[in-house]
Amino acid sequence: MRTHRGFARPKTGLLLTAGLVAAGLTTVPAVAGAAVPTGFTDTAVISGLSSPTAAVFAPDGRVFVGEKSGLVKTYDSLSDTTATIAADLRTQTHDFWDRGLLGMTLDPSFPTRPYLYVLYTYDAVPGGTAPRWGDTCPTPPGATEDGCLVTGRLSRLTIGANGVATGAEQVLLTDWCQQYPSHSIGTVVFGPDGALYVGGGDGASFNFADWGQRGNPCADPPGAAGTNLSPPDARGGALRSQSIRRPAGEPVTLDGTIVRVDPDTGAPMPGNPFASNPNVNAQRIIAYGMRNQFRFTFRPGTSELWVGDVGWNTWEEIDRIPNATDGVAENFGWPCYEGAGRQPGYDGANLTVCESLYTTGQNAPYYTYNHSSSVATGDGCPTGGSSIAGVAFETTSNYPAAYDGALFFADSSRGCIWAMRQGANGLPNPADIVPFVTGANIPVQLLTGPGGDLFYLALGAGQLRRVSFTSANRPPTAVATATPQSGPAPLTVQFNGSGSSDPDGGALTYAWDLDGDGAYDDSTAVNPTFTYVSPGVVPVGLRVTDPGGLSGTTTVTVTVGQPPNDAPVVTIDNPTAATQWSVGQTIPFAGRASDAQDGTLPASAFTWQLTLQHCTTQTNCHAHNVQNWTGISSGSFVAPDHEYPSFLDLTLTATDSAGNSTSQTVRLNPRTVQLTFQSNPSGARLVVNSVEQVSPFTRTVIVGSSNSVSAPSPQVFKGGKLYQFVSWSDGGAQSHNITAPAAATNYRATFRRA
């Protein structure tokens, strides 16, 4: 049985999320429309999608949408409500946490060249075949412990006239070794030169500074697979993003890079920066040193590549490659740098790869924003968790002139889209950023489409949405409710139309069709009452009209004298809210559901979802959907590793024979422990995971979690004197990982005068 889950991107990934576990991501009910500037509308043009992650518009009006599970759907137009399955890649796609089908583009000459390019997490170890894991990750090895190893794949599909892929999948490139379930692949896009540009993340841990110390399954140097690497010579984990800088003869991976390849073969394009390197992967690379460059795009009319790179705990960044075709490589510094500064978790480990880079520096990001700060003053967007998850340029829209040439960028964790407006030099101006969409439901891709409008995929809502502008009168939106909606005759129903609205703020008039005859002639009240005396199903209509004469309609169904159709009652028996978990703990679950009509519902009516809520404070959280199960009433899962504060939500949804659904969620808090870090003498700088602090200090972590610790050496403290590291109290190396014990523990680093 295959199970398919929602997208998790966010800071650790997305949507992702975060990361998108950066881009990371909570699935919330679809909203009528997020907040947009005056004169704009935000409307759903395609709904009912399951975790959509990639979309592309064809010149002939067709729309292709990729879902995270590996399904590709095609619509004849934006008005088409019925999808055709263009391709089913679910068997070979690892749909787990932030992994899945995440990138897609069409040949610029489509349909003359009838090719659809797809980029997905390939459910196979390097050199292996799919499916290896089947949309899950057992323990061992554990998703966030030793990791379920997979790769990334770029393929070309041939699309027939009916919108369905024909023939075999043409694999162009398989690489991107990924140990942990985030920072997977991301964008595939054509450049103005006709080359294909492809990106993938570092595939490393999002919890601790990862240099290959947990088994090194990608066989990064200097050790073999199965060998735990250690500083200063470790070149694994997140350091794969710097693999092009390895000594000659060592393997070069595509993790953390953007490559420029031939769209027919996947071979390196002539003129790439490392064209003379004997390693074919090196020949493909044009930029590197990125953590999770989930989305990137070309500025129209140029060869400039603009990249959104998801950060760790502090910075999100937008990088600019001035000319992607000029044969000059760009190194944006990850993991040695995050944003414009050194990343403490990797700097503190005295890694040779980073120390050598610090002497030359990185290519500085074009723009950064801090996770704890607003992007634009008063933008109404939450701060804390952040995952840059979309970039697109305004081109041929009818938007006001202030948006000409603007760079739109999205954050899936914050649920916002901003416009970085064009400066006097023609480039986006980081000093002129304004909110554009506020309250979007996990935006994971931005793209321009028909009319030059900005479109975005709202993963949480399962929608492709369109942001349009009109200076003319806009139609109102009708919203109607009925209480009750069903019952025996005679049935008196109270209707309510007060939720209707006019985007231009005009006063509405109301017309109701209460008897279902198609004529809006039964009431002009906002909230009328009507009594039904005969059994039947009545489609009640509401039409609202604005002062300019434009109208909107909606329908609500009233059932009179028909057998009742109650929604299921859902109970999660196990685990209970009192359950507290530690990393690696197996947690059984079981539930039941029934309703008055169907009685006890079978397991086939059940869907379970496990979500990790990652919080920057106790109240500001975003979600990573970990795993789904369908058709079972009980099972178990292994609690994942993640930084604190975080908790798990387990949701059971039951659907009865009439299609009514009810969900119940139980929140599961982790067991935590306080770890105190000291130094002798006191006052040394110590690094735990991504953050450096002056000792002594205390961290709250989840029991069983893996945490990287470093004692930077040499360092100056205690009266300006130079000190050298001697030892840790637990016997570990200067930089090593600790597994959080169940009881509060002190860790002391001892130094001596240098």
Image (cartoon, grey):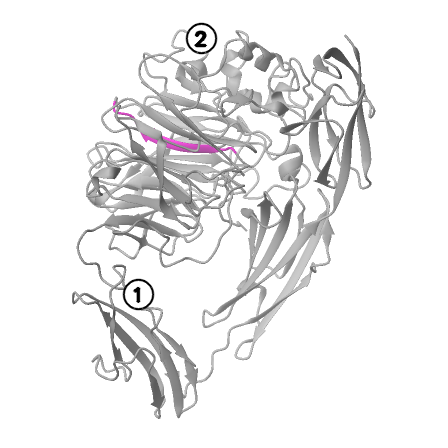
Instruction: Report the residue marked by disc 1.
Output: 501
- Mark 1 closeness class: few <14, some 14–19, many ≥20 residues within 10 Å: many
- 403, 441: nearer the viewer: 403
- Mark 2 closeness class: few <14, some 14–19, many ≥20 residues within 10 Å: few
In the image, farthest residue toward the front: 719
What type is the residue that disc 1 sits on? Ser
- 328, 64: nearer the viewer: 328
Identify the residue at horizontal 59%, vertical 45% (top origin). 615
From the viewer's perspective, tell me whether residue 255 is left or right of residue 518. Answer: right
Q: Position of residue 509 (x, y in %)?
A: 24, 74
Hey, which quadrant is residue 219 in on the image?
A: top right
Hey, which quadrant is residue 543 in on the image?
A: bottom left
Residue 148 visible from this viewpoint? yes
What type is the residue that disc 2 sits on? Pro
With respect to residue 753, does 120 lie above or below? below
Q: CA distance from mark 2 to mark 1?
A: 64 Å
First to last magenta residue range: 183-192
- Residue 58: give its label: none
Q: Position of residue 151 (x, y in %)?
A: 51, 30
Identify the residue at horizontal 44%, vertical 33% (top origin). 294
Foreground mark, 2 or 1, reads 1
Q: Secondary structure at mark 2?
A: loop
Identify the residue at horizontal 41%, vertical 45% (top origin). 379
From the viewer's perspective, tell me whether residue 88 is left or right of residue 131. Answer: left
Q: Is residue 566 magenta?
A: no
Q: Position of residue 247 (x, y in %)?
A: 55, 8
With respect to residue 515, does 387 lie above or below? above
Mark 2 or 1 closer to N-term?
Answer: 2
| Most common secondary structure along the magenta stretch | strand
Quarter of the image with the C terminus is top right
